[in-house]
Image: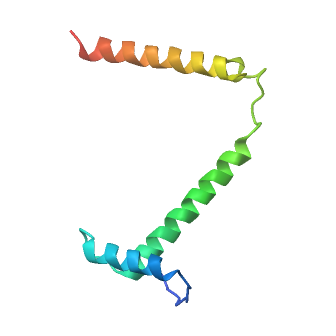
Amino acid sequence: MAEETRMVHVRMPASLVKALDDMVKRSSRPTSRSKLVVEAVASSIRREKYLNAVKGLAGMLTPEEVPQWQDEEAIDKWLSDNREVDKAAFREKWET
């Protein structure tokens, strides 16, 4: 069942409307101006929710709890070590 929709009026710069219309015309899939605007707004809302969730996690773990994250040098070493473990596991599995 389709979700109920509402009509909204939005003012946009003429150049943006033209770019939107050009995008609709050149789209490789059947679409409309409204559908592209809805997709863009939905994407923006998802991104904002994600960023707010990530910001909410800030400070959750202290450097004492996770010493490998205490500074940039420690983080770089931690990432490098983990990448090496992944590479070794890949080689072990796929290389003969």
What x and y, as percent, mark residue 88? 38, 12
The residue drawn where x is 52% and y is 14% is 81
In this rendering, the answer to whether 50 lies above or below 74 is: below
Q: Quadrant of the C terminus?
A: top left
Left or right of 24 on screen, residue 80: right
The answer to whether residue 1 shows anywhere in this view is no
Q: In front: 78, or 16?
A: 16
Left or right of 32 on screen, residue 62: right
Q: Quadrant of the N terminus?
A: bottom left
In this rendering, the answer to whether 59 lies above or below 54 is: above
In this rendering, the answer to whether 96 lies above or below 39 is: above
The residue drawn where x is 39% and y is 74% is 19
Left or right of 76 on screen, residue 26: left
What x and y, as percent, mark residue 78? 58, 18
What x and y, as percent, mark residue 21? 36, 80
What x and y, as percent, mark residue 18? 39, 80
Q: In front: 70, or 73?
A: 73
The residue drawn where x is 70% and y is 47% is 55
